[in-house]
């Protein structure tokens, strides 16, 4: 334990030194340095987007700004980088609502079922006026500044043949839906109309095969990689959790930039967002053909409005412990923006 703490301290000191050197260089008239850390791995769309951001900022600034990219947890693990961005030990990371809800509690609603009803809805909200208000709350309460929202992927229902085609939450009554074993995930299962059944991810394949569970939910690439298509029959495009990651800068670093430099950064974020979103959307769209080739039935037109209404009532009644900190006025504005 002492050895682990010592290593963490050493990494933090090195990262802090990198950051401090960037500040020193700026004062000396040298290029402004932005150190961007992520635990995402090569091949992830948002990992590749880091380099898109780097190239655009360096090009726009004519080399007067330099972006150093550190993916794959080179500087910090996921918990460590969330602390580092607040401390100023690194300039930029990816964060998201679950990581920030501890400090801005209502943000937990952005990870709930049907807060967003598709990619277009999510990006319109988080990259629009509502997002500006949300991000400013993060600035005020956490001291870090989200600069936008990149698309991470969408969770869909995946069901065994016995369940039959599902078009509405009524069709999910009694369905043993696998969920991770935490209160928020159990609430998610209830919000979809199913009977939430906690099960470790490593057990899901056999659980579906034996009937211990009758369905599960994940982004489509996960369904493919885990070979759930071998033991299920239906994919229902419920789009019930539209996930995002937020490129975020330490607020002191942000305020140290000139107006022109901030503009270059935001242009870099916009280009990186377009790249990331398109890559994820293309992957999701093209992967449906694979499942069809495996003999699966894709339900492309479920009653999403009915699912969303059911979910909202579920969170307000049987899952009050999850929704007690939500800003319901803001929630209604989010829903009206779809």
Image: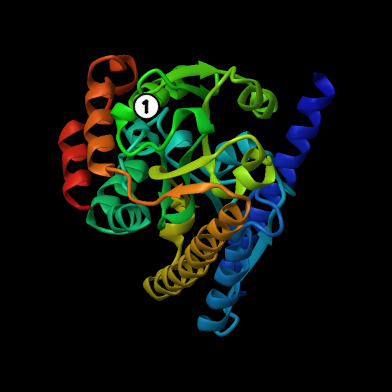
Q: Residue at x 59, y 49 (%)?
A: 295
Instruction: Please state if 279 lies on the left or on the right of 118 as rendered.
Output: right
Q: Looking at the image, which is closer to me, 326 or 182?
A: 182
The x, y position of residue 221, in whole percent, is 60, 50
The x, y position of residue 249, in whole percent, is 48, 53
> Image quarter for residue 196?
top left
> Image quarter for residue 303?
top left
Residue 178 seen in the current view: yes
Q: Residue at x 59, y 17 (%)?
A: 212
Q: What is the residue that sits farthest to the right in this orientation?
A: 3
Q: Looking at the image, which is closer to me, 192 or 111?
A: 192
On the rendered image, what quadrant is the N terminus found in?
top right
Q: Residue at x 39, y 23 (%)?
A: 194
* Image vertical order of residue 117 relative to residue 175, above or below: below
The x, y position of residue 240, in whole percent, is 38, 40
- Count of marks overlaid on the render: 1
* Image vertical order of residue 6 relative to residue 131, above or below: above
The residue indicated by pointer 1 is: 172
Q: Looking at the image, which is closer to me, 164 or 263?
A: 164
Q: What is the residue that sits farthest to the bottom in this orientation?
A: 62
The x, y position of residue 141, in whole percent, is 35, 36
Instruction: Please state if 193 lies on the left or on the right of 45 as rendered.
Output: left
* Image vertical order of residue 99 relative to residue 191, above or below: below
Mark 1 crowd level (few <14, some 14–19, many ≥20, 10 Å Cα): many
Q: Colour scheme used in the picture?
A: rainbow
Q: Residue at x 62, y 68 (%)?
A: 51
Instruction: Please state if 183 lies on the left or on the right of 233 as rendered.
Output: left
Residue 28 seen in the current view: no
Query: Element under label 1?
Result: helix
């Amino acid at each position: 334990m002492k050895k682990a703490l010592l290593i963490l301290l050493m990494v933090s000191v090195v990262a802090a030194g990198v950051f401090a050197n960037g500040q020193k260089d700026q004062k000396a008239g040298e290029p402004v340095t932005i150190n961007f850390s992520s635990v995402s791995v090569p091949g992830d769309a948002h990992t590749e987007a880091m380099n898109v951001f780097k190239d655009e900022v360096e090009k726009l600034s004519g080399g007067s700004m330099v972006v150093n990219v550190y993916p794959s947890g080179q500087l910090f693990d996921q918990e460590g980088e969330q602390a580092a961005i607040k401390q100023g030990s690194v300039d930029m990371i990816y964060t998201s609502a679950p990581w920030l809800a501890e400090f801005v509690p209502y943000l937990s609603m952005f990870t709930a079922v049907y807060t967003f009803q598709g990619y277009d809805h999510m990006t319109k909200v988080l990259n629009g006026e509502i997002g500006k208000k949300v991000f400013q709350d993060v600035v005020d309460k956490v001291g870090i500044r989200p600069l936008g929202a990149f698309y991470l992927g969408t969770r869909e229902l995946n069901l065994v043949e016995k369940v039959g085609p599902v078009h509405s939450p009524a069709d999910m009554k009694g369905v043993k839906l696998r969920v991770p074993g935490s209160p928020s995930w159990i609430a998610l299962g209830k919000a979809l109309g199913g009977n939430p059944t906690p099960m470790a991810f490593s057990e899901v394949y056999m659980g579906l095969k034996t009937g211990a569970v009758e369905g599960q939910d994940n982004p489509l690439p996960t369904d493919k990689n885990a070979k759930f298509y071998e033991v299920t029959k239906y994919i229902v495009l419920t789009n019930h959790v539209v996930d995002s990651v937020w490129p975020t800068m330490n607020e002191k670093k942000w305020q140290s930039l000139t107006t022109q430099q901030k503009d270059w950064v935001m242009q870099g974020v916009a280009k990186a967002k377009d790249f990331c979103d398109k890559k994820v959307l293309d992957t999701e769209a093209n992967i449906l053909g694979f499942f069809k080739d495996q003999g699966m039935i894709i339900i492309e037109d479920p009653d999403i409005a009915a699912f969303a209404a059911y979910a909202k009532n579920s969170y307000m009644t049987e899952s009050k412990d999850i929704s007690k900190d939500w800003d319901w006025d803001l929630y209604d504005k989010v829903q009206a923006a779809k």
